[in-house]
Every structure is written in C-alpha cells, then in structure tokens.
Image (cartoon, grey):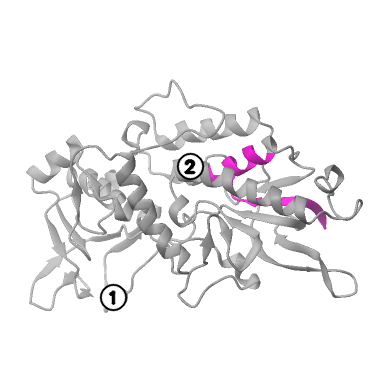
Amino acid sequence: MRDVDVVVIGAGQAGLSSAYHLRRAGLEPGRDFVVLDHAPHAGGAWQFRWPSLTYGKVHGMHALPGMELTGADSGRPSSEVIGEYFETYERTFGLRVHRPVDVWAVREAESKDGEGDGGRLRVETSEGVWSARALINATGTWDRPFWPRYPGQDTFRGRQLHTADYPGPQEFTGQRVVVVGGGTSGVQHLMEIAEVAAETTWVTRRPPVFRQGPFGEDQGRAAVAMVDERVRRGLPPQSVVSVTGLPVTEAVARAREDGVLERLPMFDRITPDGVAWDDGRAVEADVILWATGFRAVTGHLAPLKLREPGGGIRVEGTRAARDERVHLVGYGPSASTIGANRAGRAAVRGIMRLLERRPEPVGAGAGAVASRV
C-alpha cells in the first residue's frame, strides 16, 4: 500500500485541472498526490472521438489552466490535437499520470487491528492499493454509455451501436440509418451520415430546441444552475448541453433547409426490419445509432455509500455531501471544459482546508501537509 495525501482519478480536463491546482497549492506529484487514468494515452475522452470530428468542429473547447492551446490546425482530428495538447500539458507540469490504471473500488481504510485508519481512504486499483486522505473523482462519463431499452430490441436484424463507438460516416454508405437522440452528437452524426446514407431518420424523445444567436454568460449561468439544482437534490445530473439547446451553426441551418433535421417522435418498438410506432407508422432500417448520452462513472465509489435515494450523489460545490474527503469534478454542473477548470480549483481549495484542519502525526501516511502545519 502506498500513502499519499490525495488521489485523483481521471486525467481528462477535470483531472488535469485538479492536478495543476494541487501543484500550485504546494503538493508534489508522486509524493503527495497521484493521478490515475483508465485511458491508454493522454487526451481523456477526446482520444476516442471519431476521426471526422475535426478540431474546427469542436464547440467550446476551453484551455487547461496555465497553458493555452495555440496554433492548432482546425482540419486535424480533435482526438489528435487535444491528445497532443494534454500530453504536452502533463509533461510541462510534471504531473506523472499513471496509466492505464483501472480503479476498482474506494472504501474506508482499515488499520492492522481492523479499526478505521485515521480517516483514510483505500483506493483499490489494477496497479495496487493507494491510501489517501482525500480523493478527487474526475472520471467523467465516456466509459458508461447509456443504452435505452425498447420492446423488440433483441429482434432487430441490423446493426445497433452507440455514439461511443461511432466510426465516422463512411461505414454507413448506402444504408438506411435511424439516429436516436437530440443532443449535439446526434445532430453531428446525422448531418455526416446523411451525406452518404441511402436514407436517414431522426428520432428524439422531446422536440429539439434550436438556439439562435450568441450564448452569453447569463444564459450559461442559468443552464449550469439548472444542472446544479438537480445535483444538490441528490438526483442524477443532466449534462449542461442538455439544457442549453442546439446552436444553429451554418451547417445546422443548411441541414434544416435540406430536411435532414426533420425530427420524428420516439418510436414505440423495434422490429426485425426497423422501428415502428403505435399509430401504424414504420421505418425500415439497416442501422440504429443510439446517440443517447452517457452516465457518470461512479460505481467504484459505491462502498462509500454516497448515493442518495434519488439515484445521484448529492454534491455541495464539488464536495460529496456525505463525505467531505471526496470531491467530484466534471460531475453535473462542472461537466464542461470551462466548468471542469473552475471545479478543479474549487476542489483543491476544499481539500487543502481539510488537510490543514485534520493534520496527521508526522510519519503517518504521506505527511506532506502535516509537516507544514
């Protein structure tokens, strides 16, 4: 078992922002804190994005704290541009990310006599066990795609895939494709596929809301406040994007004029040959693409019993309401690039106050903060 003051789980925007602020607070990577990342390479979830999502098509990518992303080729895949940027960032600030590492569980640490170990957390991973006084969970959502269930789903003879596995439009050439989902990814996939497919059908649970004009700070704060309210009530968070509406870019405006973005209400069942509605309407399909979003990756925190009856983890700022040692960054209202940056800074401030308020005896654990207070 290795002792540190803080374990950061995840090295996407939220995790790297948190690690940066831990360094700014005086903690040393590798000695006082460690960053564990499930992904094989730097880049967070961006490294898994489809090749046709070029950097120029990315909406609202905010730079990491302390280092701007400059001179990027807008025509290159975003996975390459942002992956290289994150890699340079980790190297520049000496963050020493451990990867690939799977985190299996976080639970109360026990001392040799079986009692609580001074309020420490036991982080069980594929590279061994870490003991920490505080934890920043920055695992995001990419590893937990949401698949809705509909009657007849198992009978469909075509192909079903989630946006997490979207390979780009070329694999849908000449096929009949049903795209399910009213978010940004669903719209981007649909517009690309429509250029090569024999036929496309767009299906959403709710009528899509298209947003005209600029999206200012007031609208942004209102959107974040809506997500924050759910998290404070202990409900599963919605993405910030889900309450901001779909921006009407030139490409979106053109697709609407061409009829590509004509939406149908959610079907009632799936048939062997496509989808069908109770009113008798039916659409034949070769592929159903589920652009139905993701859920927060928090299963490894289950032993700490942080979840509320409503199904989510109640968070006050970034701190888990049921455990002041645990902060969630990139969760709920901070699930955006700029939100993750701000939340990383807030989480570190909270953790430093905790460490200073509850110093360990010198020699017990990492002791980095204990030796300074």
The type of residue carrying mark 1 is Tyr
Q: Residues within 10 Å of mark 1 (few under 14, many from 20)?
A: few
State yes or no: residue 288 in magenta. no
The type of residue carrying mark 2 is Gln
Percent x, y for residue 224? 38, 52
Res 118 quadrant in image: bottom right
Q: Which mark is residue 150?
A: 1
Q: Residue at x 64, y 46 (%)?
A: 349
Q: Which mark is residue 47?
A: 2
Asked whether residue 325 appears in the rendered view, the answer is yes
Q: Residue at x 14, y 43 (%)?
A: 255
Percent x, y for residue 244? 29, 50
Res 216 quadrant in image: top left
Q: Nearer the viewer, residue 7 or 313?
A: 313
Q: Give the quadrant of the C terminus.
A: top right
Q: What is the span of residues highlighted in magenta in the rendered image? A: 1-22
Percent x, y for residue 62? 44, 35
Label 2: which secondary element: helix
Q: Residue at x 30, y 46 (%)?
A: 219
